Amino acid sequence: MRKPKVLFAASEVYPFAKTGGLADVGYSLPKALSDDFDVTVVMPLYLTVDRRKFAIEGPTDYFDVMLGSERRTVSVYESRYEGRHYLFVYEPQLCDRDYLYGAPGEGYDDNAQRFGLFSYAVTELARRMQSDIVHLNDWQTALAALIIAEDETIRARTVYTIHNLAYQGDFPKGALTELGIDKRHFTLEGVEFYDRVNLMKAGIGFADAVTTVSPTYAEEILTHRFGCGLEGYLEKHRTRLSGIANGIDTEHFSPQTDESLLRPYKTPRGKLSNKKRYLAEAGLEDAGLPLFIFIGRFTWQKGIDILLEALPQMALMPCNIAILGEGEPQYHPRFEAVAAAHPNVHLFFGYDEGVAHRMYAAADFLLMPSLFEPCGLNQMIAAHYGAVPIVHAVGGLADTVAPIARLQESPAPCGIPFDDATPEALMAAVETALELHHDTKAWSRAATHNMNADVSWGQSAAAYAALYRKISGGAVK
Ligand code: GLC
């Protein structure tokens, strides 16, 4: 029997282009679905994508799309990276840029046009390929849900996944004409938002199913605190909304086979030699002390302000702290000041996959004080590498990290969740962590539980498969 055809569209996909967790999901979810579905992944062919390294060929196809009153020619490139089918859309305005969306903390002025164009290209591909399901992600592809809903010649059903409600694709109302969106959609029910055009609303309002990346975040976004102004609109569409937690690719993130590690390992005991080696690499001392790590973008969402406030006090405790990340420039000097005053704090500005993997392998604890977190992937990676996550209990962090006291009944990793987004609550959790680390048996029980906990895509991919079947009314078997 023919496998149903899924077109998975995202503005970034690992390893071709990545700024955040969306790219990881763009790699690992299609991979997890590929036994049951004929999945094609489509993304823009940015200037920064390495065509040679990933054997990207083409153009293999051309077509025109209308962007408002302008005709644009799009060329299509292809790759069979790791045996899966990838399509890349090329058009100069969309692709020929230094950054994907703009310099850190900024967005290009013409992003509505750029990603509107990408959405039209995705729609055209869905028509040509006769896709059964088009899976759209975040605001950059949201417009495709509206276009497909309006176009009777395209039979595909659509799933729209919100990875982060804080980025909505909100533009001046001129975007309506620029993108050729019919004026009758410029209403509260449509894409209008405070007299501007909100592309996220096209995804929420017009897709056959709307998902977000954890069950708790699906509830949270219906509230004023987490809804980013869209809580009312989401409430109206709540019967089509559900939460499916992300997993991680346990082949790529496996302490047993990880090539970045000095010694791959199967049990928490194997962490020690990796810890020693990492401490030496980072210029830190004493493998007997617990090692706390933070890995992530330096943005407001990730709770960087809370972390920065707690750090000087944490650094006075018997521990080592290693931080890897980059992001909004105002944070860098503040991190540097802490590191300059405390020799047990190590900083790595930038992103290096190998260093990150060695940090997970070395770490006893991962710090994740995010103010909100749709899912979060690092807590699952850290747990899989035998570390204990310390997390602000929101969104996906609440769903994927159980308190250590519930270790026995929880299939999820365990850790130290805290309720208030304050430096005091984080410090209290760090103190609990120090006590836990002191109790060698309890620490190793927690670390062993985490290494064995299921953080793979298994269950979640099955949930997406069930959703695909549901919205296609049996057409997708
Ligand atoms: C976004 C969210 C993060 C989520 C990721 C993948 O980056 O902020 O919580 O894990 O998307 O869905």
Image (spheres, helix red, strand yellow):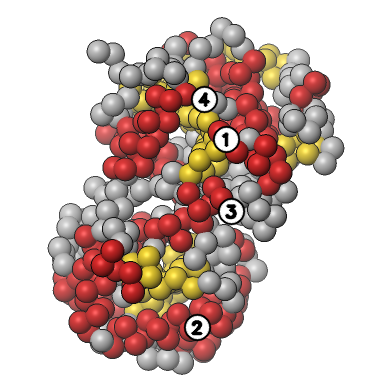
4 and 2 marks in contact (CB < 8 Å): no
The quadrant the C terminus occupies is top left
Q: Residue at x 59, y 9 (%)?
A: 152
Mark nearest the camera among 2 and 1 is 1
The residue at the far right in this view is 195
Task: Give coordinates of residue 144: x percent, y percent.
Answer: 59, 25
Mark on residue 220? Answer: 3
- Type of the residue with mark 3: Glu
Spatial separation of the CA atoms under disc 3 and disc 1:
15 Å
Q: Earlier in the sequence, mark 2 or mark 3?
A: 3
Residue where numbered disc 4 is placed = 158
Residue where numbered disc 1 is placed = 239
Q: Residue at x 53, y 87 (%)?
A: 312
Mark 3, secondary structure of its residue: helix
Spatial separation of the CA atoms under disc 4 and disc 2:
44 Å
Q: Earlier in the sequence, mark 1 or mark 4?
A: 4
Describe residue 32's horizontal placement relative to residue 113 as left or right: left
Residue where numbered disc 2 is placed = 427
